[in-house]
Amino acid sequence: MPESPGSGGNLRTVVLAGLVNLGVAVAKGIVGFVSGSAAMLAEAMHSLADTATEVLLLVGLRRGARPPSEERPFGHSRETYVWALLAAVATFLIGGGLSIDEGVEAIRSPDRQQQQLLAYLVLAVAAVLESISLARSVRQIRARARRFVVRPLLLVRQGSDTPTRAVFFEDSAALVGLALAAAGVGLTHLTGDPLWDGLASIAIGVLLICVAGILGYSNITLLIGRAVPERGRARIKRALLEVPAVEHVHELLTLYLGPDTILVAAKIDFSSTASSTDVEVAADEAERRLVALFPTIRYVFLDPTGGGGSEDRPASPI
């Protein structure tokens, strides 16, 4: 299978996010140890989890791009979801679990010395870098939305492009986490009570667990098998009905085989006057229209059924 139109953009988005998170994780970790801030250490774990996530997403993109084979006739695209699910688990364990543990430990040991100036500086730089990475994923989502003529919010909620969605959610959570860390460091600085720093660390952990849960559930549904959203199915059905010789669509099935691969299968009632040749021409026209409608439609199977017509009409999928 040739590389999909969006796969190159996905790869660049994931690589950029990974490089940003790796650099930010190192900076946060150093400042966290030097300043003694639990919130900064939690943010370091947050960025470390995001880095691990990007590595797993990168592996998924590369393995999912392998061409179809005799044993894998529909390709390996769905493997992307397996690695994205592992990435969600990494976020849950590394980011969420360790951040909460660090926050609890900070509350239990309130005698840590803190140096806020370094923390503020790193948080500001990290916010700029995370914003750059987030802007990249937003552009990717908007470009995909324009291609499919849907709202970007729909792709964020129900899209099949797991790598870009994962980067979007992670970078968004990263900015929220930076705000929580800044609040924890700032309140501890103002009140002299390290409780706020510990609470900020716990809040960052809860945030990461929520993000991991959202991404994990999304990947599970895609692995089980998810249809194109209702609006997309309606457009596919309308495109089929616009094909000459097609009178009715009895059943329409769609399935995401990967981030950039959709399968369409339909039971079609052709005109009673349509010959076998007419049916073949209509089937070719239907596939052309569907691919033009959604570039990620790679497989189209039409089953002539129902109403009269010639008895020599092809019965096998086209």
Image: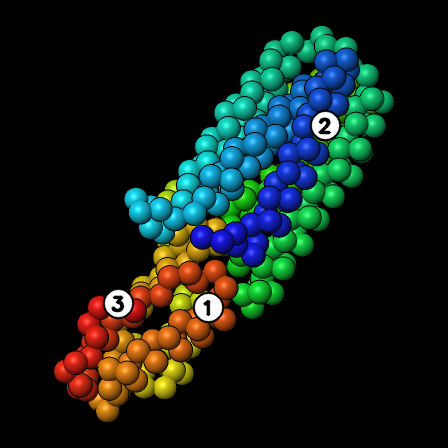
* Badge 3 element: loop
Q: Is residue 133 left or right of residue 89?
A: right
Residue drawn at (40%, 45%) of the image:
76
Q: Look at label 2 and name its amino acid.
A: Gly
Going from N to C along the chain, the mark reached first, 2 or 3, is 2
**Direction right: furthest residue:** 117
* Badge 1 element: helix
Q: Residue 283 at what x, y percent from top left?
A: 34, 76
Query: Residue 169: which numbered mark, if any?
Result: none
Which is closer to the viewer, label 1 or label 2?
A: 1
Query: Against 256, is 85 above or below?
Result: above
Q: Are marks 2 and 3 in contact (CB under 8 Å)?
A: no
**Direction left: furthest residue:** 311
Residue underneath mark 2: 23
Report, in whole angstroms, how far the alpha carbon at label 1 lies from the one at label 3: 17 Å
Q: Residues within 10 Å of mark 3 (few under 14, many from 20)?
A: few
Residue underneath mark 3: 317
Going from N to C along the chain, the mark reached first, 1 or 3, is 1
Q: Are marks 1 and 2 in contact (CB under 8 Å)?
A: no
In the depicted view, which residue is nearer to us: 215 or 207? 215
Q: Residue 274 at what x, y percent from top left?
A: 26, 88
Q: Is residue 209 left or right of residue 136?
A: left
Q: Residue 207 at what x, y percent from top left?
A: 57, 34
Q: Look at label 3 and name its amino acid.
A: Pro
Q: Residues within 10 Å of mark 1 (few under 14, many from 20)?
A: some
Report, in whole angstroms, how far the alpha carbon at label 1 lies from the one at label 2: 41 Å
Query: Residue 291: which numbered mark, if any?
Result: 1
Q: Residue 30 at what x, y percent from top left?
A: 74, 17
